[in-house]
Amino acid sequence: MSTSTDPVDPTGAAGPTPFARARVEPDPTNASPFYAQGVAVTGATRWLHVSGQVGVDAHGVPGDGITAQTQLATAGVRAVLEAGGMGVADVVQYRVYLTDPAHVGPFAEAAAAALPADPPATTLLVVAALAAPGLLVEIEAVAAA
């Protein structure tokens, strides 16, 4: 039995605990293929909160345009998930920040390949600016396993 003083291995090396993730939709006939209205999680013993990942390369240079920045930001999210012993299928919520409403469509297209087939709960906000000039997208995630 684990107590609050037991060390925790963030990679889950002791083995994953089965958990269930269920999409929650008030009207399943009108469900979006890109996000879930809610996600119910049962049995999860590990949670990973991924800080905002932005569209910059390894040298901190922003990608050229929303597509490139989306690919870099989603790669950053995947890298943090993998470092925590998880993957995109474990994500139960995304928060996406864009700096231009015209980027919603191109973002969705670029991110589609990186998102799980069963979409998590998602919030997309259009904001005036991000932390540094030139940044167009930032993605946060919450994962459970």
Image: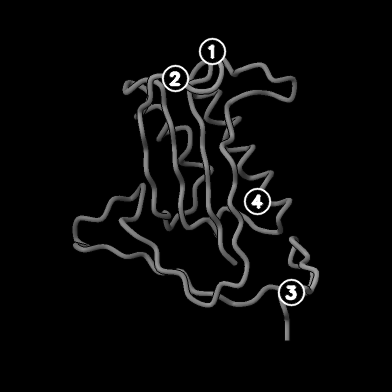
What x and y, as percent, mark residue 118? Answer: 43, 58
**Is disc 1 in contact with disc 2, using a CB cutoff of under 8 Å?**
yes
Helix, strand or loop under label 1: loop
Residue at image point 46% right, 47% down = 94
Q: Nearer the viewer, mark 4 or mark 2?
A: 2
Residue 133's disc is: 1
What x and y, as percent, mark residue 10? Answer: 74, 61
**Is disc 4 in contact with disc 1, using a CB cutoff of under 8 Å?**
no
Q: Earlier in the sequence, mark 4 or mark 2?
A: 4
Residue type highlighted by circle 1: Pro
Q: Nearer the viewer, mark 4 or mark 1?
A: 1
Residue type highlighted by circle 3: Gly
Q: Earlier in the sequence, mark 4 or mark 1?
A: 4
> What is the CA distance from the residue labelled 3 to the residue labelled 1?
42 Å
Residue 129's disc is: 2
Give the labeled residue for mark 4: 81
**Is disc 4 in contact with disc 3, using a CB cutoff of under 8 Å?**
no
Residue at image point 36% right, 20% down = 100
